[in-house]
Amino acid sequence: MPVCRGKSALEQLNKTLEAAIESALRSAQQAGELPQFEIPRIPVSPPKRAGQGDWAYPAMGLARLARKSPLDIARLIVDRLPKLGFAGKIEIAPPGFINCTIADDYLRKQIDAMLAAGTVYFRLDIGEGKRAQVEFVSANPSGPITIGHTRNAVVGDAMARLLEAAGYAVQREYYYNNAGNQMIILGKSLQLRYWQQLGDDAPLPADHYQGEYLVDIARDLVAEHGESLRGQSWHFFKEVAEQVMFRWIKRSLAAINIQHDAFFNETSLFDSGQIWSVLDTMREHGHIYQATHWEGADADEIADVTSKGYEPATWFRSSSFGDEKDRVMVKSDGVPTYTLPDIAYHRDKLERGFDIAVNVLGTDHFSQAQVVKHGLRALGMDPAPIDVIFLQMVRAVRWNAELGDFEAVKQSKRAGDFDTLDDLVAMTSADAVRYHMLARSPNSQLDFDVDQVVKQSNENPVYYIQNAYVRCAGILREAADRGFDGDDADLNLLGKEELKFIRKALEMGNVIEQAITLYEPHKIAFFAHELAGVFHPIYDEVRVLHSEVPAETAKARLRFYRAASTVFGCLLQLMGMSAPERM
RNA sequence: GCUCCAGUAGCUCAGGGGAUAGAGCAUUGGUUUCCUAAACCAAGUGUCGCAGGUUCGAAUCCUGCCUGGAGCGCCA
């Protein structure tokens, strides 16, 4: 699903300004006005208050190096600053800020540029010609998508969209395992549920899958096949369960606008022998040994393993890469642990040549992810392209008045639970799920307040943002009905407020870049909300089709709203939300 | 015990060296003849967990501590 494809038109003004300031400093040094020193990177940033320009540079950071007062340094910079196409006023403010304002003319031109380019206007070129992969969700097909997977799915897909907007060619991948113990138990659980449906006394052991969804599948099997499956082994039921699960998973994800390009099966690493070649290479590099316990084990650990009576296992000396202990690659019974295929999978990823490979995981995989990176180093590879977004826990909660506190919503057999993606969507909406799951820093725990999202949806940021788009659409629709267009508008008739909106919109490029370089896609959600906050007061005040608005002014304003519509359309697309024409 | 994350307004959370710390929700009062109320305008609240340190400047970086959460398997 390509987002914002095409050639970039958006200039990242902060970068232009930073480069200009550096050049001014260099020039001042050459002229002997400043001593020689390495110019530190001091970023320009948008100031917090009005009247301080659009971008501010604190020259205070240079005072020590330059052995001059910040104000003097600021003056030297401003004197030698190259001409900037976008700059209006450039002012110096105590204690040593350089405040640069974007010229109104430049802002007006951007409206034309946005209309000419459409959402492509906001595309960046930092990922041009590069390939990125986002691996996310990666839930084994043993049950429905839970609320935890949902956060993972939303963050991963948003990351993918942001990377696309930054110019990367992005692949969305889903890694899964359908071979392990869990899947065997799943098959056996379904088999028992099937027998139960036939009226047999077939109790489900406690370690089997208790979920009601297997009963549903069993019921369907009876409806379709009657008793004819009674003789089938658990293998058969595993296959059935897996197929149904994946169908459900894909359908659930599609409901929130998420689709993977590739599904990578862990089993293929066994079939192709890749896990063994990984192990061989690690052994050749001297990182593998056979033992009943790891080399650094203390007396307690040794006593513990001894009591279990293990035969020797195959260990990876990960401690030599900084791990706190070594890890088992192949258990004493000859079966590999999860870690070995995981290393093989990531080797395969690196060999596929992605410039960036983002992995979205819960924090419970923190240690595992470290071990995988150690493993890649042991293979002589550089794991640098691989980055992991760790998500803190998420749970559905609701207010409990008796407790006077929030209470986790647990998966329950009865209707009215909210613990799966389907439940969340049913009770709220796909857009609400996407926004609320995205609008939180990955390393904050998230309590998804079901009642708030449901009950107060009228006061929801989701609708606040979408309504900005809807309002633009309303104007454009009405204008079209009246046969009114703003194509030959004089944008000089626009007011300060409209230009303020354009100013804010121009920050989007920086937000996208920050979101992908810091791996914090939630930034786009907050930006969207802020931008809507700038929009609504304007909409309230600046009318287009009103008897008191002169025709020429109306044309200019119509053009402005057309541009605003483009901006919100792009933002909603980036967040995977719908852009409704009406609400 | 060790590692990671969080602690900011009544609640949910942004901000992660720069100017007077923000938003939503909740509370209070006001706003619609003509695209508009899922909106707008106005009002109030803070020992940025605690204590030191670094810096011209710290909510932000460092150290220690307190509280809450997650992880530390021959599980996946």
Image (tube, helix red, strand yellow):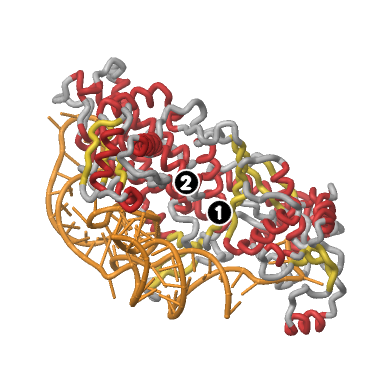
Helix, strand or loop status at disc 1: strand
Looking at the rendered image, the quarter that the N terminus of chain A falls into is: top right
Q: Which residue appears at 87% of the width and 58% of the height?
A: A231
Q: Position of residue A333 (x, y in %)?
A: 86, 68
Do we see residue A329 in this rendering? yes
Asked whether A72 or A87 is in front, the reply is A72
| Subunit of label 2 | A
Q: Is residue A448 above or below residue A73?
A: below
In which quadrant of the rendered view does residue A559 lie? top left
Which labelled disc corresponds to residue A448? none
Asked whether A483 or B72 is in front, the reply is B72
Q: Which amino acid does label 2 sit on?
A: Ala
Task: Measure how far apart labels 1 and 2 are at the Cα level.
Answer: 12 Å
- Mark 1 burial class by Cα count in 10 Å: few <14, some 14-19, many 20+: many
In which quadrant of the rendered view does residue A115 lie? top left
Q: Position of residue A513 (x, y in %)?
A: 46, 41
Q: Name the residue under label 2.
A: A515
Which labelled disc corresponds to residue A389? 1
Q: Which residue appears at 45% of the width and 45% of the height?
A: A514
Q: Where is residue A473 in the image (x, y as percent from the top left)?
A: 35, 30
